[in-house]
Amino acid sequence: MSETQRLLAICGMATEAKATLAMQLAEAEVQAGRRVVIFDNNDRRLQVEGLLPRRLTGGCVCCSLAGPLRQAVEQSDADTLLLVVSALAEPQQLARMLARLRRPQRAVLSIAVLDARTAQAYLALQFATAADLIIDADIPTAALLVQVQQALTESR
């Protein structure tokens, strides 16, 4: 494992945009020589070329699956952990659960992915309020990856 493990929680209502961002982040991290694990609690199963996401079903990581997720994160020796969160997650509860996963050797960053279609929905606004970084899914990928890298650097 690298000096600081990264846990990136990708949340919001834009299911396809979350999946796309997760795949792009995974690809960038692998290209940078980092070992990546994806925890998939998304509303639709993720398919990432070259990686087998660990599917977390039967609830949401903010509540009923928080314990199993916490255990999986603590046991992982990957450099980067990507967590794609269900749109049904309760944003404040998710923020509290992520805060419990922060360690001196683990940077935790929550990313709310909003798009033009879902940005004004009540739950989307709650995700935006609780997230460390808000991303507009309608902007080009390269710019999104730069935003995430900058936020990670600032969170250390």
Image (tube, helix red, strand yellow):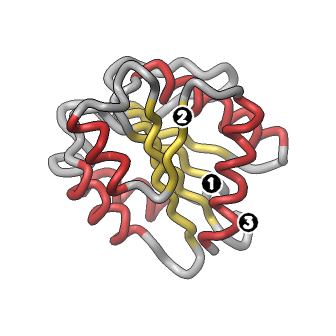
Give how far across and how far down residue 53 sits, in percent: 50, 31
Q: Where is residue 124 in the image (x, y as percent from the top left)?
A: 30, 37
Q: Which residue is drawn at 46% across and 54% down?
A: 110
Q: Which comes before the other along the chain, label 3 or label 2? A: 3
**Would you say 144 lies left or right of 129 here?**
right
For badge 1, the amino acid type reads Ala
- Among numbered discs 1 and 2, the one appearing first in the sequence: 1
Amino acid carrying label 3: it is Ser
**Quarter holding the N terminus?**
bottom right
Query: Residue 132: where, in percent of width, then height?
Result: 47, 59
Question: What is the spatial separation of the Cα atoms under label 1 and label 2, in whole angstroms?
Answer: 28 Å
Q: In this view, does 56 lie above or below 95?
A: above
Say which quadrant the C terminus sits in: bottom right
Please tell me which residue is depicted at 51% across the width and 53% down the height of the picture.
133
The residue beneath circle 3 is: 2
At a point 59% along the width and 31% down the height, the residue shown is 21
**Residue wearing tag 1:** 78
SS at mark 3 in the image: loop
Question: Amino acid under label 2?
Answer: Asp
The residue wearing badge 2 is 136
Using the image as rendered, state which of residue 108 and residue 79 is in the foreground. Answer: 108
Q: Splitting the image into 4 quarters, where does residue 96 fall?
A: bottom left
